[in-house]
Image (spheres, helix red, strand yellow):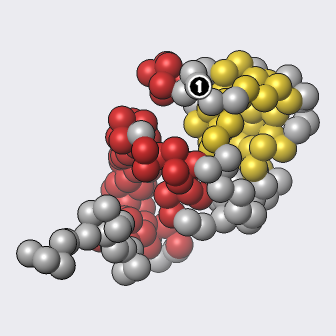
């Protein structure tokens, strides 16, 4: 992740105290954060999903890319230093290399999730309980397409052609 941090050197730095909330689940901020130092926790509801201390870790990208509210709360567990992008969408559109690195990161997460679900499917296929529907979850993950997808204005076909 260090390469992401290297590309964010011009962004403003913020120092936040332990307990500070960067992103709130269910809200939309349009912001993107890149961790420079310290530890943050990721929460879904009251459940801690992860503790992250890797410099270059990014937060807020899913909300920006999906144009939806944040799926989790991100809170500083220790004092932290972060790079802050107030206009995350503009930043990603103007930095295709960063957008590519985020795409690679998200593809890795999806691969890990589907690998785990395939393992669950193998273990519980044929069971009549809720674990028996893992195949349906995999099908949705693999085949779901965003019906609202459209090319951005810079990618639309030229009407003169």
Q: Position of residue 65 (x, y in %)?
A: 49, 57
In the rendered view, does 63 fall on the left or right side of 53? Answer: left
Residue 84 is drawn in which quadrant? top right
Q: Position of residue 13 (x, y in %)?
A: 73, 26
User: In this rendering, is residue 91 above or below 97?
Assistant: below
Asked if residue 47 shows in the view, the reply is: yes
Q: What residue would you read off at disc 1? A: 10
Q: Position of residue 111 (x, y in %)?
A: 36, 46
The residue under the point 51% across, 63% down is 66
User: In this rendering, is residue 5 above or below 19?
Assistant: above
The residue under the point 44% across, 21% down is 3
77 vs 7, nearest the viewer: 7
Residue sitting farthest toward the left:
161
In the rendered view, does 148 fall on the left or right side of 79? Answer: left
**Quadrant of the drawing holding the C terminus:** bottom left
Q: Position of residue 69 (x, y in %)?
A: 66, 65
In the rendered view, does 132 fall on the left or right side of 56? Answer: left
């Amino acid at each position: 992740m260090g390469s992401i941090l290297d590309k964010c050197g011009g962004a403003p730095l913020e120092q936040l105290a332990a307990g500070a909330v960067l992103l709130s689940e269910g809200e939309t901020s349009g912001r993107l954060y890149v961790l420079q130092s310290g530890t943050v926790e990721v929460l879904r509801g009251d459940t801690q999903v992860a503790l992250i201390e890797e410099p270059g870790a990014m937060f807020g990208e899913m909300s920006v890319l999906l144009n939806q509210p944040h799926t989790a709360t991100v809170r500083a567990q220790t004092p932290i230093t972060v790079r802050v992008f107030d206009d995350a969408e503009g930043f990603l559109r103007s930095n295709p290399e960063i957008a590519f690195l985020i795409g690679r990161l998200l593809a890795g997460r999806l691969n890990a999730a589907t690998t785990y679900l395939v393992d669950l499917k193998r273990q519980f296929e044929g069971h009549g309980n809720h674990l028996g529907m893992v195949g349906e979850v995999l099908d949705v993950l693999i085949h779901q397409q965003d019906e609202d997808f459209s090319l951005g204005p810079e990618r639309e076909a030229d009407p003169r052609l």
